[in-house]
Structures are given as structure tokens and as C-alpha cells.
Amino acid sequence: MSWARRAVPAAVAAVAALAARDLLQRDHALRRNFPVLGRARYLIESIGPELRQYIVAGNDEERPFTRDQRRWVYASAKQENNYFGFGTDNDIEHTAGYPIIKHRTFGRAVPPSAPTAGHDVTLPCAKVLGAARGRAHAFRPESVVNISGMSFGSLSGNAVEALNRGAALAGCLHNTGEGGLSPYHRNGGELVFQLGTAYFGCRDERGRFSLERLKDLVAAEPVRALEIKLSQGAKPSLGGLLPAAKVSAEIAATRGIPAGRDCVSPSRHAEFSDCDSLLDWVELLAAETGLPVGIKSAVGDLGFWEELTTLMRDTGRGVDFVTVDGGEGGTGAAPLIFSDSVSLPFQQGFSRVYRTFAERDLHEQVVFVGAGKLGLPDNAVVAFALGADMVNVGREAMLAIGCIQAQKCHTDTCPTGVATQNAWLARGLDPARKSVRAANYIRTLRRDLVKVAEACGVEHPGLIGTDSVEILDGRTSSIPLDRAFGYRPEWGMPSAADRAEIVRLMTAEAPQGGSAPPSPTAVG
């Protein structure tokens, strides 16, 4: 017991020292008034997210992703049972804005009845990316679900590698994010190269955009399209800063910047200053690389979109795709006011952009991509009904490879090694194993989209019309999706030719279901 006799006085002395320090310090009134005990408040506050996540919050309460939503992603990624029993937790009758998908008793598509139906379905885009403008390397994306732009530097190298390997397994596109094309992006997945304001990966020694470096890069790598990033939903109109401490030699080589120095991304592009010069640059990039070129943007003032579409209609220049990022989208770090209150949420923003294109008869010439919590089947179905041709998944893909929504992306202390440059934390993420989970998640989301489309009587989610969705407006009323967002009945769909071709592709690949043989007395 001699060790106990020594330990007790030591513990008492340590507590006394803490108490003295609390009494003498002047920064925290709570600790000064309640020495030692006051520290418990800060401890509980620091683990508040974990307490709510695992103990306090209900299945449908937590944000940005509820427990039910995370459970669905995790189970899908692990190929475990992702069904839910007993009924919905959602308060459907009293939730204004709740979307309801309307199934059809008799539809053109007949869902197969096998439990595994749709697991291995191919789900290509209903439009050919770049075809409307005759791009040399126009192509039909193999998947309507693709991985959103998340840079190496924001994510760890192991996380980027896992996502790229997963993209290769699932046959989908992987957006590089604005941080350049790293060695971790070179693991088989086809890429969309994102051009941010700092032109990382295609800039010269003075930080200026270099067309020759871009051409060399896309010629050497499986880059299928270029995306000019104007803004993102969680922090529109802001630049970025990667502190010097995080600018390793590897990140510096990827971005084309000096190692160990602050890395600043401007808030605006230097290559264009208005819609006219933006379209000139789009056409230059497309002509020099042969690749489809698009833009990514959050939605605020509609004046930009009205000017852009008017110029596209009147001059013949134009973008091949538009990625609309909702204000509820994710980011590694942003001021709270920007995450919470700057830029429209996806459904509001996307519908306004789509209407602007449709009013000028341009909607069938552009591939529309949605982003902002669209990695969940219900949100994605509404996006397709509004006119999206593809969806990008970001945080949902992070969940699939191990993210636990710790919300420490901005601290470099992500406990699962996803959003950190800490080598010890990143080593816990095995890219080979996690890539399989990323692919499983993407395949499952595609399966659910096909199953919902078939329930709506069509063969492909891109053919789900606005008449298949209603928006609840309290307990006793609802409004059709087209009326809710000011659509004309024919909007939200690909062209007639594109619809016919995607039906042909889907029915050739996915056999239709059926029923038991009819009885001799069956009618019709």
C-alpha cells in the first residue's frame, strides 16, 4: 500500500495546484469563481458533438447528416443490411417542404422482383457530355453518380487514393478538386480536373495560368473533362488559405507552389472578369484540349446566369456542363456565416438556374450536375426530377470510407484519417479496403435510384418527371414539384432523342421484371 500513500498526497497537490491556478487566472470567470469544478464545463463542451452523436440525438435530429442517414451510408458501404424496420422516424404529416415520390400502379418500366435486382446495374448519363458543341472528346459518362471535388490537402493522400480506387471499381468519375492532380489521383479512376482561382497543377513559376502545362497534364492522365470552379456552396466568393505548416513537399509538388509557405487561393479568377471573357476562356480550353468544359458555382444573384445564358444563345459559345452546388454543401473550413447563410440551398438554386437555361431553350444542350447532400436517394430523386442529369457526392463518399462526422476537418485532427495531413492519423485509413466501401456505396445509391425510377414507371432516374414528386405543405395540402419551382410541364427532362437512347441502353442492359403466369380467366 506504499504506492497508495504516495499517490494520494500527489493527487491532492495536483488538484490544489489547479485550484490555485484557476483562482489566480483572469481569462475565465467560471474557473475563477469555481476552481477545478469549472473545468468540467469546458470538458463537456469539448465532447458535446460526440455526446449528441452517440447518446442524446434522435435518429432524425442531427445535422448535417442524421444518424439514420449515416447508418444507411455505412451499411451500404459495408454491404450490410441497409433496410429499416417498423416505419419512418420522420414527422411526414407536419413537415412543410417534405418531398413525396409518387409511384405508379402501371408504368412503362416493370421492376424485377429478385432481392439483388439492380445491384450491378449500369446507370449512364442520359446526355452525352460535350456532344451539343461538338467537342473532340465528347463522351457519355458511365455513371450518374460521381465523386465531388475534394482536394488533396483538404483530404489526406490515403483518402484521395481510396476514393480514386473506388471510382475505378464503380466506373464513375472522380473530381480532383482545385488542389491539383496528385499521385493519389492516379489509381485508375477517370478524372474531372478542376481549375480553381490559383490554377494549381497548371500554373507557371509566377502563379499565372499556363495553357501548356494544362495540355501536358490532361494528355498524360485520364482526364475526361475540365471544370472551372467559380464558387462552392459552403463558402461562395471566398478564397482560401493553406497555412505554411500544412504545405508539405508533396502538396507543394502537386500544386506547383513553394513548400513551407502559406498557400493563398484568390477569391476571383485572373483569366476572365465577366461572362463574355469567361465564355472566351471556355472555348479556348475546349479547342486546345478537345475536352468538355463546364463551370461549378453556388447560386446567389441571378444576373450572372441571365447574362451567361443570353450570351450562349446569341453567340454560340457555351459551357458543356453546369455543376450547381447548394448552400448546404460541405467544406473543409469556412466562416460560420458563409456556411449558414450565403448562397441558396440546392433545390432553390438549381431550379432557378435550370429555368434560366430553359427559358432560352438551352437546357437540352447542357449537362446539369447537382451537388449538396445529394448522396442520399431521396434528395437525389428530387434533383433528377428538377432536371439534374448527374449528381456529385462528397461528404457521403467520405462517410463511406470512414468519416464519423466528427466535424474536425478544419483542425487537422480528423480521428479517422480522412480530412487531415497528420501522417499518424492518415495511416489508419487503408486505401485498398476503403476503396471497396466507396464503390459499394456508389453502386447501392445507383441501385436505389433505379428502383425508385422503376416505381415511378420509367427506366432511368433522369426520366423521372416533375409530376412524380409532390411537396407537402403542412398536414392537409401539397403542391406538385413543377408548381413549387415555377416549371413548365415539359421542363426537367432530356431531349426526345436523348430519352429514346437512354431507354434503349437501359432496357438492353437491365432486363425488365414480370409477374406470375396469368390465369385462364385473366382479362386483357
Image (cartoon, rainbow, N blue to C red):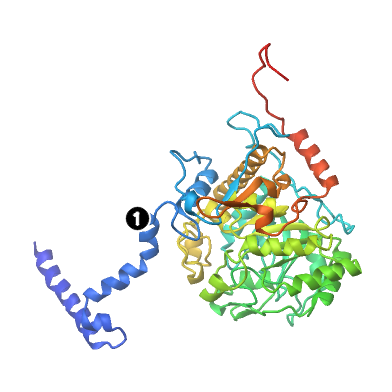
Whether residue 146 is visible here, answered yes or no, is: no
Quarter of the image that includes the N terminus? bottom left
Whether residue 39 is visible here, answered yes or no, is: yes
Q: At which x and y percent is residue 282?
A: 83, 69
* Other-residue count near label 1 (Cα within 10 Å), few / some / many at <14 / 14–19 / ≥20: few
Q: At which x and y percent is residue 490?
A: 78, 51
Residue located beneath label 1 in the image: 55
Quarter of the image that includes the C terminus? top right
Question: Foreground residue, 354 or 338?
Answer: 354
Residue found 50% across the figure and 57% down from its top: 65
Q: How many marks?
A: 1
Residue found 22% across the figure and 74% down from its top: 37
Question: Foreground residue, 24 or 424?
Answer: 24
In which quarter of the view is residue 505 placed? top right
In which quarter of the view is residue 345 placed? bottom right
Q: Secondary structure at mark 1?
A: helix
In the rendered view, tell whether residue 305 sits above or below residue 431. Answer: below
With 477 as the anchor, is 276 left or right in this view? right
Question: Foreground residue, 217 or 235?
Answer: 235
Question: Foreground residue, 206 or 446?
Answer: 446
With 30 as the anchor, is 462 left or right in this view? right
Identity of the residue furthest to the top in this view: 520
Residue found 49% across the figure and 38% down from its top: 81
Q: At which x and y percent is residue 46?
A: 36, 69
Q: At which x and y percent is residue 49?
A: 40, 63
With 195 as the anchor, is 480 left or right in this view? left
